[in-house]
């Protein structure tokens, strides 16, 4: 029997996490571009010949959007751009290979949260498929909107864009994408406003906070100020642990995250997901921290050879499920799959292909 404490792990995700999860693009090799060169690399610029000169001057989508949004006459152009960006992003699909987002999802529990700044649909796709295995998954917050998510303004219900609202049976409206302009308006849309309110509460309550692939850019001043304030007002800040998963140089990261680096807080820097506390203590990263710091009884879940159970690069879906069952107990972990094996198997074969056949029994 493993111990559970009422503590949560918050994972905040930026563009670098999608790049690490999909280094060669989506399953058809479609690129997930950075803000710099976004319109050119996606081919969207071909639909906007009138923007060629301006893009040459402002290749970064953030700068371009800031310039265009200053003039009301560009409203129509911005709406067309939004449609094309959505269409491109919504067309991305994770494909059959297990990816880092799948591994992240299964490594956390329903006590935990993932907050993402990304518009791409990969995290939502991962949640969609992993929820056919277990209901014990983290809650996701989309801080800048997301192409895979919809919202019913009448019933205040959020769901996948391809679903209907379970309450009023109406189609969801797309959650707006918050564009990377210097002055972001987090109050304008109720869904985004609510995501930020929730995030502030979780920053306050979480024992462990991981930033993965988030560069804390200066243009995100408003976002950083809100997160800093929530952290600094937290009564438990001296007990918290920060972890930063990022390939950038440590000195640059220390500067970017200086608002969060508070002396008694433990901060660690790692370069990959596999080195993180999430992968090293899956499904109980906070429990391990709590036991280490509060109870002084360090513990991890070990297998029959007394080796600590960790998530590794070579793990496929099957080996991860086996490991998670060892951690959680077989009765607990595959609840969704066991309740509805036919639907679950169909969904998982649809995602992972026929090679899955037989392994879910
Ligand atoms: Zn509704």
Image (tube, rainbow, N blue to C red):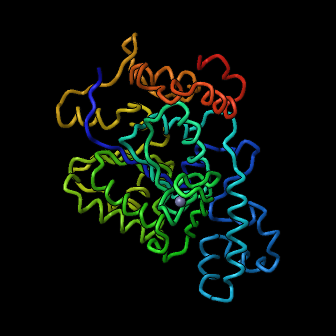
Q: Residue shown at 76%/78% (left/top)?
A: 51
Whether residue 357 sits left or right of residue 239 in the image: it is: right
**147 horizontally vs 215: left or right:** right
Residue 180 image offset from top left, x and y in percent = 56, 70
Coordinates of residue 301 in the picture (x, y in percent): 35, 22
Q: How many marks?
A: 0
Q: Where does residue 339 sit, x and y in percent of width and height?
A: 51, 26
Residue 351 higher or lower than 220, as above or below:
above
Q: Residue at x 82, y 76 (%)?
A: 49
Seen from this angle, which residue lies furthest front? 168
Return the residue nearer the eye: 178 or 26: 178
Viewport quadrant of the C terminus: top right
Q: Is residue 289 above or below residue 51?
A: above
Q: Which residue occupies the extreme top position in the image?
A: 305
Q: Quadrant of residue 292?
A: top left
- Where residue 276 sits in the image (x, y, percent)? 42, 38
The residue at 47%/65% (across/down) is 192
Q: Is residue 75 above or below residue 142?
A: below
Outermost residue, left direction?
295
Residue occupying image coordinates x 74% and y 50%: 30
333 or 340, nearer to the observer:
340
Q: Quadrant of the N terminus?
A: top left
């Amino acid at each position: 029997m493993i111990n559970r404490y009422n503590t949560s792990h918050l994972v905040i995700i930026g563009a670098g996490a999608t790049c690490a999860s999909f280094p060669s693009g989506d399953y058809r090799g479609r690129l997930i571009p950075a803000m710099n060169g976004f319109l050119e690399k996606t081919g969207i610029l071909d639909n906007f010949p009138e923007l060629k000169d301006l893009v040459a001057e402002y290749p970064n989508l953030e700068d371009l959007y800031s310039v265009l949004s200053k003039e009301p006459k560009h409203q129509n152009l911005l709406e067309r751009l939004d449609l094309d960006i959505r269409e491109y992003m919504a067309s991305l699909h994770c494909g059959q290979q297990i990816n880092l987002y799948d591994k992240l999802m299964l490594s956390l529990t329903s006590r935990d949260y993932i907050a993402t700044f990304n518009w791409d649909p990969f995290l939502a796709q991962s949640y969609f498929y992993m929820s056919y295995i277990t209901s014990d998954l983290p809650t996701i917050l989309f801080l800048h909107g997301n192409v895979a998510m919809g919202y019913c303004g009448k019933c205040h219900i959020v769901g996948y864009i391809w679903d209907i609202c379970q309450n009023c049976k109406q189609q969801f409206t797309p959650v707006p994408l918050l564009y990377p302009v210097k002055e972001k308006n987090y109050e304008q849309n109720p869904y985004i406003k609510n995501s930020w309110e929730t995030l502030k509460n979780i920053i306050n309550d979480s024992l462990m906070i991981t930033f993965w692939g988030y560069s804390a850019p200066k243009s995100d001043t408003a976002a950083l100020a809100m997160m800093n304030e929530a952290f600094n007002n937290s009564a438990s800040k001296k007990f918290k642990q920060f972890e930063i998963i990022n390939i950038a140089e440590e000195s640059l990261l220390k500067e970017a995250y200086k608002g969060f680096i508070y002396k008694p807080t433990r901060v660690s820097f790692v370069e990959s997901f596999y080195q993180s506390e999430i992968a090293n203590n899956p499904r109980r990263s906070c429990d391990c921290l709590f036991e280490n710091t509060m109870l002084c009884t360090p513990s991890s879940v070990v297998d029959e050879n007394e080796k600590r159970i960790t998530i590794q690069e070579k793990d496929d879906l099957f080996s991860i499920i086996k490991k998670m069952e060892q951690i959680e107990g077989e009765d607990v972990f595959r609840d969704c799959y066991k309740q509805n094996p036919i639907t679950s198997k169909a969904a998982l074969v649809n995602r992972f292909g026929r090679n899955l056949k037989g392994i879910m029994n």
